[in-house]
Image: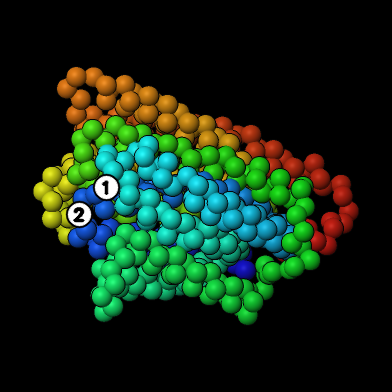
């Protein structure tokens, strides 16, 4: 366990962010590698895998319920020096991860084809996306356990083990992708099914490695079968904090689904170009997202320790760093988009869509970085409802106008990207206002609490200051 309630806030952020970033980038690279090898199968295969991958946003919504709830509550417990509560939350979250994983498998088997029919441009894309989803669902189901274990470590200030496990799993995925997709060395090409299978095998190996780490190395939080019986009060604590953050990912799923819906009249090449551009954009946003995610546990531990000024300082430092990083990548996307997109498709029409998307949408990267930072701070404060409100605002100010514009004569796809810039900027402004209001309520009360509690002669040993 690492104490984040003392020392330089900026140093804590910069120490935690790189391992988080490496872990996220390796996952994103895995998706890009899948797209790279699938691109040889044609536009329908690329569009199908890209659209199917968007379903991951919906599953990630459930993952965020567990991840955010675990990080916030465990970090608060660590800040209070309350190890028993941290362990109880961890084990209850493990129970939820099993239940959510089973739900994902059942829903994936039942709904994959219906989802692809709702967003795909043609029958070939529907078939490719459905096949990929069915083989990819085990990977999504297993990631619930990975999410809980990684979140528990991050809440205690430990990020390197999860990063190493993710990196190794991605190396395995990258090695398996050409073998299973194209049949390298075996002569048995599985196509898009091979892309999903490679991911599922890699995630399974990653889960086994994290389980071994927790059994042999981790000491602050640990598996305790005696705490695996579901306890309604503690499950409710996790869900109450995590559900609004999960709703944020559900909103992202809606946004992406709307884009695929309005682009389907432009054909598979347009959807494929958007899918490639979206994943490259996600990759270059990873450093800023990693910085924001590092800020969450720091804010959470200091919130639990009653150090409101350090919570505010965490936001200011994280916001400045994310803005600087996003500004740099925005300049790169504007000046050299070909460096970021080279090699993903030989189809001229597909790549023209990807270039247009990245050049326009990168203009909102600074605003997106501020949204990341505010979202992580709300997690640290233990109240993620404002995140849901700001995300819902973006959905309504983007989705409804986009669908309406798509019905108008002379509709062009770049109108969708310009609309996204406006909606993202609005969400960033609303998030900043909501965070300022939350600081005014929670941190003032928190800073006044020690004076009100002063007459108590002896604190309980479990909550005594370090």
Instruction: Give the quadrant of residue 171.
Output: bottom left
Q: Residues within 10 Å of mark 2 (few under 14, many from 20)?
A: some
Instruction: Give the residue drawn at x 32%, y 70%.
Output: 180
- Decide which of 390, 94 is in the foreground and name it: 94
Task: Tell me the quadrant of the picture where the C terminus can be found.
Answer: bottom right
Question: Looking at the image, which is closer to me, 258 or 431?
Answer: 258
- Please tell me which residue is depicted at 36% across the width and 34% down the height of the picture: 258
Q: Residue at x 28, y 43 (%)?
A: 123
In the image: residue 59, left or right of residue 70: left
| Spot occupied by residue 251 in the image (x, y as percentages of width and height) | 46, 37
Q: Looking at the image, is 224 positioned above or below residue 246? A: below
Q: Residues within 10 Å of mark 1 (few under 14, many from 20)?
A: some
**Mark 1 lies on residue:** 124
Residue 120 location (% of width, % of height): 31, 41
> Is residue 400 in sight in this rendering?
yes
Q: CA distance from mark 1 to mark 2?
A: 10 Å
**In this figure, which residue is indicated by the disc labeled 2?**
42
Earlier in the chain: of badge 1 and badge 2, it is 2
**Secondary structure category for the residue under label 1:** helix
Q: Quadrant of the N terminus?
A: bottom right
Can you give x and y, in whole percent of width and height, for residue 452 in the image? Answer: 80, 41
Instruction: Identify the secondary structure beneath mark 2.
Output: loop
Q: Residue drawn at (69%, 38%), measured in percent from left and top?
A: 445
Callout 1 touching callout 2 (CB < 8 Å): yes
Classify 191 as above or below 334. Answer: below
Q: Position of residue 403 (x, y in %)?
A: 33, 25
Image: 404 above or below 348 = above
Task: Compare residues 229 and 192 and report the one nearer the observer.
Answer: 192
């Amino acid at each position: 366990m690492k104490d984040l309630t003392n020392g330089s806030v900026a140093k804590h952020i910069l120490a935690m962010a790189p391992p988080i970033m490496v872990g996220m980038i390796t996952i994103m690279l895995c998706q890009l590698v899948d797209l790279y090898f699938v691109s040889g199968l044609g536009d329908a295969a690329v569009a199908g895998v890209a659209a199917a991958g968007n379903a991951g946003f919906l599953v990630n919504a459930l993952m965020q319920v567990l991840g955010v709830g675990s990080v916030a509550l465990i970090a608060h417990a660590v800040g209070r020096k309350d190890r028993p509560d941290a362990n109880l939350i961890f084990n209850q979250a493990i129970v939820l991860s099993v239940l959510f994983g089973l739900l994902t498998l059942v829903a994936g088997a039942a709904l994959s084809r219906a989802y692809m029919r709702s967003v795909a441009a043609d029958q070939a894309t529907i078939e490719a996306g459905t096949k990929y989803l069915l083989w990819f669902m085990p990977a999504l189901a297993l990631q619930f356990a990975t999410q809980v274990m990684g979140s528990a470590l991050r809440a205690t200030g430990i990020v390197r083990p999860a990063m190493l496990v993710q990196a190794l799993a991605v190396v395995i995925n990258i090695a398996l992708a050409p073998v299973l997709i194209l049949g390298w060395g075996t002569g048995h090409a599985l196509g898009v099914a091979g892309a999903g299978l490679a991911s599922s095998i890699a995630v399974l190996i990653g889960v086994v490695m994290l389980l071994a780490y927790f059994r042999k190395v981790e000491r602050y939080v640990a598996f305790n079968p005696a705490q695996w019986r579901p306890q309604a009060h503690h499950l409710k604590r996790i869900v109450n904090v995590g559900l609004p953050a999960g709703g944020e990912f559900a909103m992202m799923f809606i946004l992406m689904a709307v884009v695929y819906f309005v682009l389907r009249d432009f054909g598979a090449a347009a959807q494929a170009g958007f899918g490639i551009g979206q994943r490259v954009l996600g990759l270059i946003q990873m450093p800023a997202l990693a910085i924001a995610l590092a800020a969450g546990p720091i804010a959470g531990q200091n919130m639990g320790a009653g150090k409101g000024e350090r919570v505010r300082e965490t936001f200011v430092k994280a916001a400045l760093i994310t803005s600087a990083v996003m500004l740099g990548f925005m300049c790169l996307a504007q000046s050299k988009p070909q460096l970021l997109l080279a090699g993903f498709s030989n189809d001229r029409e597909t790549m023209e869509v990807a270039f247009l998307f990245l050049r326009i949408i990168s203009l909102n990267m600074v605003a997106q970085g501020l949204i990341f930072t505010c979202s992580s701070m709300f997690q640290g404060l233990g109240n993620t409802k404002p995140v849901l409100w700001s995300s819902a605002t973006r959905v309504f100010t983007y989705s409804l106008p986009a669908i309406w514009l798509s019905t108008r004569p002379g509709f062009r796809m770049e109108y969708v990207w310009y609309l996204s810039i406006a909606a993202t900027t609005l969400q960033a402004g609303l998030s900043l206002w909501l965070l300022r209001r939350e600081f005014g309520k929670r941190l003032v009360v928190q800073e006044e609490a020690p004076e009100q509690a002063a007459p108590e002669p002896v604190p309980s040993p479990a909550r005594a200051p370090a």
